[in-house]
Amino acid sequence: MSAARPVDPPKRRRSAWQRLRRATRGPRNAILAGVIAGTGRVLGTLPAPFGLAIGRGLGGAAHALLARPRRLARTHLGMAFPELDARARRRLVRRTFRHAGESFTELALWAKLARRPDYVVVEGLAAVDAALARGRGAIAITGHTGNWELLAAAMAARGYPLSVVARRVNDVRFDALVMSFRRAAGVDVLARDRPDFLASVRAALSAGRIVALLIDQDTQGAGVFVPFFGRPAHTPAGAAVLALRAHVPVLAAFIERRPRGGHLIRIAALPLGESGARERVTALTARFTAAVEEQIRRAPAEWVWWHERWRRQKPASAAPTA
């Protein structure tokens, strides 16, 4: 007698509210993109101190209104810093939202802030110059720490040839907003979902450019599991693969707020060690990720804690066969 066929679990039906949200996503995104663009234009006309104060207020308002990101941020902070009590986590999450609002305002004000050489101070330019002097370009790794868009803009403003690897935002209106700032700041973008992506990366390195990658999110593409705050986290390995294949120098670059205003960029060379197979890629990705974690621990209010960094679980090892 044949075994009974397992019954498939019933499919979850979307609620009327979920169907409505899905159906209206396009118009809602169009309105939101218009609001963001309009708010940015207004903020860009204001004196910098006043505009930055408004940005912090906008971040505080977002903290009050956006329940799910606020909840995710508190949960993830608890996972990364279990020694913090609930009150400390709430304070830190509030600071994270205020930082995000201030960062948005800084992008709107960048045309003014770029004329203030003391607003973004850079340590480690000698490491950048030494890497580029080899003539093969360089890989720069960073994360969604501090105002990472300002990091790229500040380096481009100093005349460094910078190409940033980025995924196109799903909604074309939001993608256009981000791209308009990057173009205005002189930052070249390599879209990683284009068919000629690898060829464009090789061309950028051959031209002696810095190819920068954000490596601290669980993306849909291939990756490896490496430790992140003591937990396995699925991490893109592209930076390690590129560095090992192209034999180019690797730099770690991070930006953080200074207590009295403005930002500090720290740049340092990262050794590659011996080249090797996939195990070497994983080890190098772990080293890169450790550098990102060190920066987050230095300025924990400046990371995107609402990102579901540990969403994907490491598969269990296969049981040994007899």
Image (spheres, grey):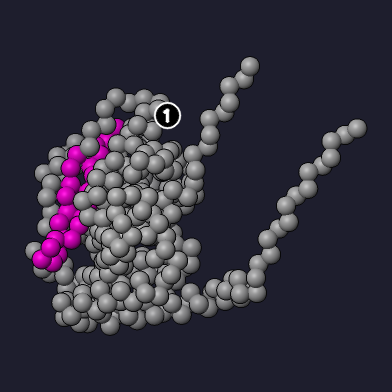
In reply to whether residue 254 is colored magenta, the answer given is yes
Residue 314, how many percent across, how many down? Answer: 49, 39
Q: Tell me the residue that label 1 is attached to.
A: 278
Check the picture and name the quadrant holding the C terminus.
Answer: top right
Q: Residue at 75%, 49% (x, y): give it.
A: 8
Q: In which quarter of the image is residue 55?
A: bottom left
User: As drawn, which residue projects farthest toward the top?
Assistant: 322
Q: In which quarter of the image is residue 111?
A: bottom left
Q: Residue at 16%, 50% (x, y): give it.
A: 266
Q: Residue at 48%, 74% (x, y): give it.
A: 29
Residue 278, how many percent across, how many down? Answer: 42, 29
User: As drawn, which residue projects farthest toward the left?
Assistant: 118
In reply to whether residue 179 is colored magenta, the answer given is no
Q: Is mark 1 on a helix, strand or loop?
A: helix
Check the picture and name the quadrant holding the N terminus.
Answer: top right
Q: Quadrant of residue 18?
A: bottom right
User: As drawn, which residue projects farthest toward the right?
Assistant: 1
Would you call the spot at circle 1 few (<14 residues within 10 Å), some (14-19), or many (20 or more)? few
Q: What stretch is highlighted in magenta?
A: 246-269
Amino acid type, label 1: Arg
- Is residue 262 among the parts visible in the rendering? yes
Residue 47, how many percent across, how many down? Answer: 16, 80
Question: In this view of the protein, which residue sits in the foreground, 310 or 109?
Answer: 310
